[in-house]
């Protein structure tokens, strides 16, 4: 369950999906002697430091983050060290589908409709193309690479520059993109803190 707002409204569901189900999968994997790749998120960090390493201290700041951390802990505690990998990603984007919007589809829908979009300039992430993430996850699974691994995109940039790059690539009007500070954003945008 990755919808930050929904996790705040339905914390029990968030914990059931992001924590309890992961614990159940880890227990089943142990019985079957399987290798587990748990996909997690940079949201387990509080965002104060940035440029996080796998070994940095975590500090969840909302229900989504709080529900993802026990899932990670379940994998680590239920399985032997060589039997798991936790892959943390950041701002996964793709062409998408209407039922599953992402940062790129949000910007595309606004700009292609001639609507302006407000994007933060003081919040940084490492946007990750879904096919790149898929390739990383397949490699981790096939090679059974154990441990905590940050599987984010190679570029660290703010949301405003991400939107400008999309506009340029898709030949959309970049003048419709407004730079704002995080403190001036609504609850949903503030909840989408990213860290890697």
Image (spheres, rainbow, N blue to C red):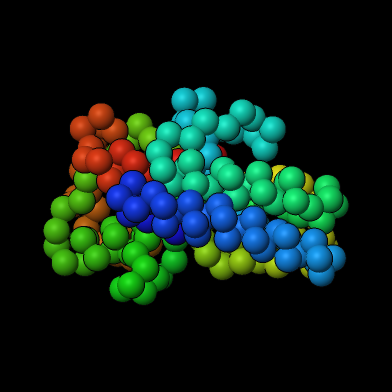
Q: Residue furthest top?
A: 49
Residue 137 in the image: x percent, y percent? Answer: 67, 62
Q: Where is 171 relative to 79, above or below?
A: below
Q: Residue at x 21, y 61 (%)?
A: 110
Quick check: 176 left or right of 139?
Answer: left
- Name the image quarter holding the N terminus: bottom left
Quick check: 151 left or right of 178?
Answer: right
- Closest to the observer, 44 or 102: 44
Q: Residue at x 80, y 61 (%)?
A: 30
Q: Residue at x 30, y 50 (%)?
A: 9
**Total marks in image:** 0
Q: Residue at x 53, y 47 (%)?
A: 68
Quick check: 108 left or right of 44?
Answer: left
Q: Would you say residue 163 is visible in this rendering? A: no
Residue 106 in the image: x percent, y percent? Answer: 29, 60
Residue 170 in the image: x percent, y percent? Answer: 33, 65
- Closest to the observer, 147 or 160: 147
- Closest to the observer, 150 or 119: 150
- Closest to the observer, 61 or 163: 61
């Amino acid at each position: 369950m990755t919808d930050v707002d929904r996790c705040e409204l339905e914390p029990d569901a968030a914990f059931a999906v992001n924590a309890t189900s992961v614990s159940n999968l880890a227990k089943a994997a142990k019985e079957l002697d399987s290798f587990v790749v748990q996909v997690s998120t940079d949201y387990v960090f509080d965002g104060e430091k940035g440029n996080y390493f796998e070994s940095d201290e975590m500090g969840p700041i909302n229900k989504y983050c709080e529900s993802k951390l026990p899932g990670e802990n379940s994998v680590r505690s239920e399985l032997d060290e060589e039997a798991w990998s936790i892959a943390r990603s950041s701002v996964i984007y793709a062409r998408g589908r209407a039922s599953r919007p992402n940062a790129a589809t949000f910007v595309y829908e606004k700009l292609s409709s001639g609507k302006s979009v407000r994007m933060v300039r003081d919040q940084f992430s490492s946007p990750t193309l879904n096919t790149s993430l898929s390739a990383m996850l397949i490699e981790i699974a096939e090679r059974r690479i154990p441990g905590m691994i940050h599987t984010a995109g190679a570029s660290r940039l703010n949301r405003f520059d991400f939107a400008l790059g999309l506009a340029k690539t898709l030949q959309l009007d970049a003048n419709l993109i407004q730079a704002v500070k995080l403190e001036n954003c609504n609850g949903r945008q503030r909840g989408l803190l990213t860290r890697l």
